[in-house]
Image: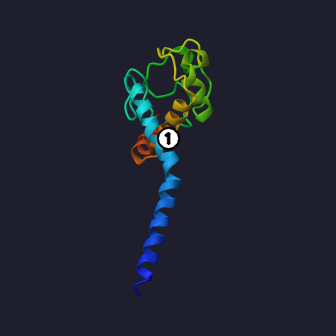
Amino acid sequence: MRATGPVCWLLLCTALAGRAAADTPADDAYARGARVYERCAACHALETDRTGPRHCGLFGRRAGSVPGFPYSPAMRHAGFVWNEKTLDRFLRSPVTAVPGTSMGYDGVKDDAERRDLIVFLREVNSTAPCRKLSADAAQRP
């Protein structure tokens, strides 16, 4: 009987360690992306428009389409939908991706920082507050 206690403890620790190891890369990318997003927060917020448009509902949304946000004509007519690929291209160099954009930011030049930022944005867009805000916006005329 006494021998099963250590065996069970070892199995539990092994399972938890395996789970923690499996979660670590994405968790690390999310945490690093959150730190990169702090730079974005000078002009953007997740749930509200500021100098830049809100980021909730970003994935799958047509560029330049947040209702009521005063986009540049270039962004309103950019003609693409936000996904990992288009976001990566835009974040690398906004003025190259959309010439005439009013976004006055040079871009996230570091590939790893951009990937982490996209992981962060993808994850926060899957949270309940962002999903609700996106659904509410989609129902507006």
Residue 81, by quadrant, is: top right
Horizontal and vertical percent for residue 47?
Answer: 38, 35
Kindly identify the residue that appears in the image at 61 percent across and 29 percent down. Answer: 86
In the structure shown, which secondary structural element does the residue marked by tag 1 occupy? helix
The percent coordinates of residue 17 (x first, y second) are 47, 60
Relative to 110, does residue 140 appear above or below in the rendering? Answer: below
Query: In the rendered view, does 96 fall on the left or right side of 47?
Result: right
Q: Is residue 124 above or below residue 74?
A: below
Task: Name the foreground residue: 62 vs 16.
Answer: 16
Residue 95 pos. (x, y %): 56, 15
Q: Which residue is labeled 1 in the image?
A: 29
**Residue 66 seen from this side:** yes
Q: Amino acid at mark 1?
A: Ala
Measuring from the top left, give residue 84's x and y in whole percent. Answer: 59, 35
Q: Nearer the viewer, residue 97 or 37?
A: 37
From the viewer's perspective, is 98 left or right of 36? right
Number of numbered discs present?
A: 1
